[in-house]
Image (cartoon, grey):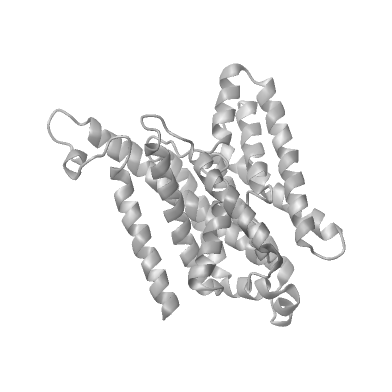
């Protein structure tokens, strides 16, 4: 019952932040201002066309990144395994950058080419990290992290090369995009991200039992009838789908996938039947709060939300590393 109560509290907090966030910003908007009446409709336009889509984007992106981090941590049995540290975000960013630089305008089943390219880049990155980690005997944390760092630098170097070869305007756009941001006007970006989030999260939620067993150990999972190779392939696909969708719309936003699952484990335990929905809600709550701070700290200017998460995530990463948490199983 304690886990259910904690899950309910997280849900209430997430709902409260989600409802309050659109009213908070450089200029606070009251409830009366959101109604279209009279001659002054500027605040109503800001609320419905900018702030509501932005809050939705923040919540969906945070939930997707947190779920991806939780999945990686269960599969690799290490709390330091996240889309950012494993180079998946860099792979997705590289795919999206290649698409933008090519100048092509294509879509696949109504999904933008940039989103598809980011997904392919993310899938390529996690495949490379997993392959490099398994290439050596055993499955050590050090090898996994080093492989992630190597893959991240590999893709980042190509992104820098593309940025260097671009003109001043595109170079600045790439630099600003790499900082991670939730700026959007209208619901186009939200609707683009939504299918990536829905499909990926549904797959992760479906495999809660398998995540519980695999976070204990692959041998135990096999003894309980889990097809480890197939499950890993499916979950790699799901996480790459979510990370690719987020990066294509917002740029790489780091450390959400590290902090949210770890905090939720401290609050609710290690059972993924409870941990998965808690992580989904907390991830959305966390990134929405970060976005609020990014909008008000140096108003009227804004800080890219990726800078805020990095400022919080850097010390958190060091704490995990020093405390020795990375050497323990996530179960």
Image position, residue 205 (x, y; %): 53, 67
Q: Which residue in the rendered view is the most extreme toward the left?
A: 38
Q: Which residue in the rendered view is the most extreme toward the right?
A: 137
Q: Count numbered badges in the picture.
A: 0
From the viewer's side, name the closer residue of 265 and 62. 265
Image position, residue 44 (x, y; %): 23, 36
Image position, residue 33 (x, y; %): 19, 38
Q: Is residue 308 positioned above or below 229 on the image? A: above
Quarter of the image where one finds residue 11: bottom left
Image position, residue 81 (x, y; %): 66, 57
Q: Which residue in the rendered view is the most extreme toward the top?
A: 167
Residue 200 seen anywhere in this rendered image of the structure: no
Q: Would you say 161 lies left or right of 261 here?
A: right
Q: Is residue 129 positioned above or below 206 on the image? A: above
From the viewer's side, name the closer residue of 318 and 186. 318
Residue 321 seen anywhere in this rendered image of the structure: yes
Quarter of the image where one finds residue 252: top right
Q: Is residue 254 positioned above or below 27 on the image? A: below
Quarter of the image where one finds residue 1: bottom left
Q: Which residue is located at x 60 percent, y 23 percent?
A: 171
Q: Is residue 65 positioned above or below 299 on the image? A: below
Q: Which residue is located at x 63 percent, y 74 percent?
A: 331
Q: Which residue is located at x 34 percent, y 63 percent?
A: 12
């Amino acid at each position: 019952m304690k886990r259910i109560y904690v899950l309910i509290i997280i849900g209430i907090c997430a709902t409260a932040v989600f409802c309050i966030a659109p009213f908070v910003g450089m200029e606070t908007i009251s409830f009366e201002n959101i109604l279209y009446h009279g001659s002054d409709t500027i605040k109503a336009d800001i609320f419905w066309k900018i702030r509501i889509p932005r809050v939705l984007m923040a919540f969906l992106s945070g939930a997707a990144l947190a779920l991806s981090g939780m999945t990686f941590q269960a599969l690799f049995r290490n709390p330091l395994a996240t889309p950012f540290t494993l180079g998946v975000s860099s792979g997705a960013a590289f795919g999206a950058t290649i698409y933008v630089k090519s100048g092509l305008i294509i879509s696949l089943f109504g999904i933008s080419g940039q989103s598809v390219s980011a997904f392919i880049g993310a899938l390529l990155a996690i495949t490379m990290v997993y392959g490099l980690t398994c290439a050596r005997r055993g499955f050590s944390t050090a090898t996994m992290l080093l492989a992630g760092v190597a893959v991240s630098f590999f893709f980042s170097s190509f992104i820098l090369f593309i940025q260097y070869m671009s003109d001043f305007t595109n170079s600045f756009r790439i630099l600003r995009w790499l900082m991670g941001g939730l700026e959007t006007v209208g619901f186009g970006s939200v609707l683009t991200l939504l299918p990536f989030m829905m499909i990926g999260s549904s797959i992760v939620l479906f495999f809660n039992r398998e995540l519980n067993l695999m976070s204990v150990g692959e041998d135990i999972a096999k003894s309980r009838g889990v097809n480890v190779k197939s499950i890993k392939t499916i979950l790699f696909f799901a996480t790459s789908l979510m990370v690719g969708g987020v990066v294509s719309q917002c740029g790489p936003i780091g450390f959400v996938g590290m902090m949210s699952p770890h905090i939720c484990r401290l609050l609710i335990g290690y059972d993924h039947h409870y941990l998965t929905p808690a992580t989904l809600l907390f991830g959305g709550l966390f990134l929405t709060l970060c976005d609020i701070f990014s909008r008000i700290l140096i108003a009227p200017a804004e800080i890219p939300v990726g800078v805020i998460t990095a400022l919080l995530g850097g010390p958190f990463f060091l704490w995990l590393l020093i405390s020795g948490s990375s050497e323990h199983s996530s179960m």
